[in-house]
């Protein structure tokens, strides 16, 4: 029987990638459990999703932290308190400090809505669309100290059609994100 990996999922928003991970776990195709969900945003819809599925969640807002490392210390403490082995960034819109990355060496995964190393940073879908690429996609990679850099685990490619808008392209990419993130976690 496969070993169950204890995940700590970090979110800021809707949490559709979180949902895909939950769905794969629940249907038995991903040997993992979510030990804790951490959101930096108290109104993230991802928190509702966690509640519905009985997943423990913590909101860690930014107020009261002097700097990025102090904030990250609190997050790392929370992850460790829940025995997290692998950290999964699922739309977590903060750059991690070196302290965080040293705490989970090669154990932080990120998903990005573009074919890295192209179009890192925010709005990867829009950057690629505005550039006029004919193919775009998404990337799961291990996080390092750069922004959306670090060893690539899996990528998925989607075509950009003439009739596409940024929204239709983003939707096509997101569907692939939901497929490859659970796959990358399974590989781990
Ligand atoms: C996803 O498209 C993810 O790739 C992106 O945020 C979205 C979160 O959606 N992440 C980044 O842009 C990180 N640079 P979700 O909350 O519905 O999973």
Image: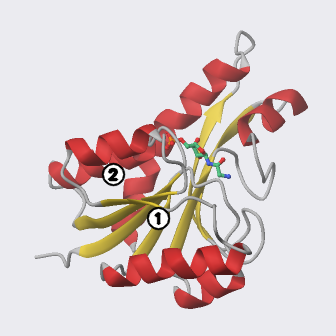
Image quadrant where one finds the N terminus: bottom left
For the residue carrying disc 1, how many other residues have a C-alpha within 10 Å: few (<14), some (14-19), or many (20+)? Answer: many
Q: Residue furthest right?
A: 131
Task: Locate residue 43, reporting x and y percent.
Answer: 48, 40
For the residue carrying disc 2, how many other residues have a C-alpha within 10 Å: few (<14), some (14-19), or many (20+)? Answer: many
Q: Between 43 and 147, which is closer to the camera in this rendering?
A: 43
Is residue 85 found left or right of 104 in the rendered image?
left
Position above or below: 96 against 113: below
Is residue 90 found left or right of 166 in the rendered image?
left
Question: Callout 1: helix, strand or loop?
Answer: strand
Q: Are marks 2 and 1 in contact (CB under 8 Å)?
A: yes
The disc, 2 or 1, on the residue closer to the chain's N-terminal end is 2
Is residue 9 found left or right of 90 in the rendered image?
left
Q: Between 69 and 93, which is closer to the camera in this rendering?
A: 69
Question: For the point 71% across and 9% down, which residue is it?
Answer: 163
Task: Locate residue 158, reporting x and y percent.
Answer: 61, 34
Task: Locate residue 77, reporting x and y percent.
Answer: 45, 83
Quarter of the view holding residue 152 = bottom right
- Which residue lies under the disc numbered 2? 21
Image quadrant where one finds the C terminus: bottom left
Question: For the point 54% across and 89% down, which residue is it?
Answer: 103
Q: Between 13 and 188, which is closer to the camera in this rendering?
A: 13
Question: For the point 15% across and 55% down, which residue is it?
Answer: 28
- Which residue lies under the disc numbered 1? 88
Question: For the point 62% across and 29% down, which residue is it?
Answer: 170
Position above or below: 1 against 183: below
Mark pair 2, 1: CA separation: 10 Å
């Amino acid at each position: 029987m496969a070993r169950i990996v204890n995940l700590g999922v970090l979110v800021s928003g809707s949490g559709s990638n979180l949902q895909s991970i939950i769905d794969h776990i629940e249907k038995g195709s991903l040997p993992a459990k979510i030990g804790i969900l951490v959101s930096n945003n108290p109104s993230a819809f991802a928190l509702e999703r966690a509640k519905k599925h009985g997943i423990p969640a913590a909101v860690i807002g930014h107020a009261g932290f002097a700097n990025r490392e102090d904030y990250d210390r609190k997050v790392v403490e929370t992850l460790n308190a829940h025995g997290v082995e692998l950290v999964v960034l699922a739309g977590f819109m903060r750059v991690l400090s070196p302290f965080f990355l040293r705490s989970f060496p090669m154990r932080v995964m990120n998903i990005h809505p573009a074919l890295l190393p192209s179009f890192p940073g925010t709005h990867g879908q829009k950057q690629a669309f505005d550039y006029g690429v004919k193919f775009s996609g998404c990337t799961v990679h291990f996080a390092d100290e750069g922004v959306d850099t670090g060893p690539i685990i899996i990528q998925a490619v989607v075509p950009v059609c003439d009739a596409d808008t940024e929204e239709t392209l983003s939707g096509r990419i997101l569907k692939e994100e939901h497929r490859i993130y659970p796959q990358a976690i399974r590989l781990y």
